[in-house]
Image: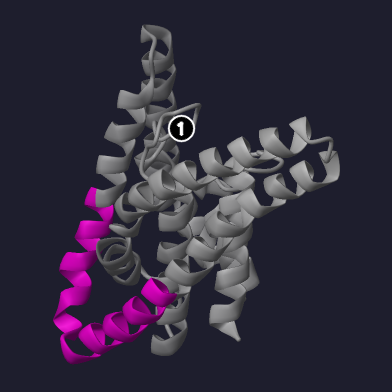
Amino acid sequence: MDYLVVAVVAGLAAVERKGFLQAMLSRPVALAPIVGLALGDLPGGLLLGPPLELLWLGAVNMGASLPPNEALGAAAIAAAAVLSGRALGTGVTPAVAALAILLAGTLAALGRATDRAIEEWNVRLATRAEVLLDRGSPRAAMRENLYGMVLPFAVSAALAPAVAAVAAWVIPAVLRSFPALNAPLGWGWTAVGGLAAAAGARAFRSARGIGLFAGAAVATFAVGWLAGGAR
């Protein structure tokens, strides 16, 4: 049942990403918490959303641009982390999150290849729609648009739960067999946050944006430091 939920959420995110609505719900900062909520672990999804968003902040799907498929990657990572945390009984810990990104993050790059195939498919559908319009069949032409949403839904609905299932089997096995890895993987999660912040800063196109980003980073660090000292 869990993997069916992942399939539906990932498939809908793939359609929302480019084919319909485009309300940014497929962005990692929104999608990871949605996956977490759907699987019963909203805090786990909230933990993963911000760094994944920063990591793929520059991955904007506009026009003919084919960046890494951040929606597919985020759905698989969040599902893998939440299901692994449930199997371990710990929830999404830094170690679990780091391993989920390591095992499922490459799916975003694979998603770029599937996007290319989907674009080629949609070009053929658009050509068929034009022919149908010339023949005076507007309803048939509209159906071609619906067909164009089927393939991205199916690809994401198949890949995200499949990769999440493998990762959700590997991660608990690794952490149970080698519990000493929890500490270094925790530091790895901190490194992921730093890498994500650097990637997010690089995505800015103006000096003012970089300044605002740096100011927000300093303020966040200060608040975290003070909160930690208060405890």
Q: Position of residue 23 (x, y in %)?
A: 68, 39
| Residue 128 highlighted magenta (yes or no) | no
Residue shown at 57%/48% (left/top)? 26
Is residue 231 visible in the rendered image? The answer is no
Residue shown at 35%/65% (left/top)? 97
Q: Position of residue 220 (x, y in %)?
A: 43, 36
Say whether residue 158 is left or right of residue 135.
left
Decide: is 53 above or below 9. above
Decide: is 119 above or below 65. below
* Quadrant of the image occupied by residue 91: bottom left
Q: Which residues are magenta?
A: 162-191
* Marker count (numbered): 1
| Residue 185 highlighted magenta (yes or no) | yes
Give the residue type that dot 1 points to.
Val
What predominant SS class does the magenta segment belong to? helix
Residue shown at 56%/71% (left/top)? 7
Q: Could you tell me which quadrant the C terminus lies in? A: bottom left
Decide: is 34 above or below 6. above
Say whether residue 200 is left or right of residue 187.
right
Residue shown at 47%/48% (left/top)? 118
How dense is the environment of label 1, judged by Cα within 10 Å: few (below 14), some, or many (20 and up)? Answer: some
- Along the viewing direction, whichever of 46 and 112 lies nearer the viewer: 112
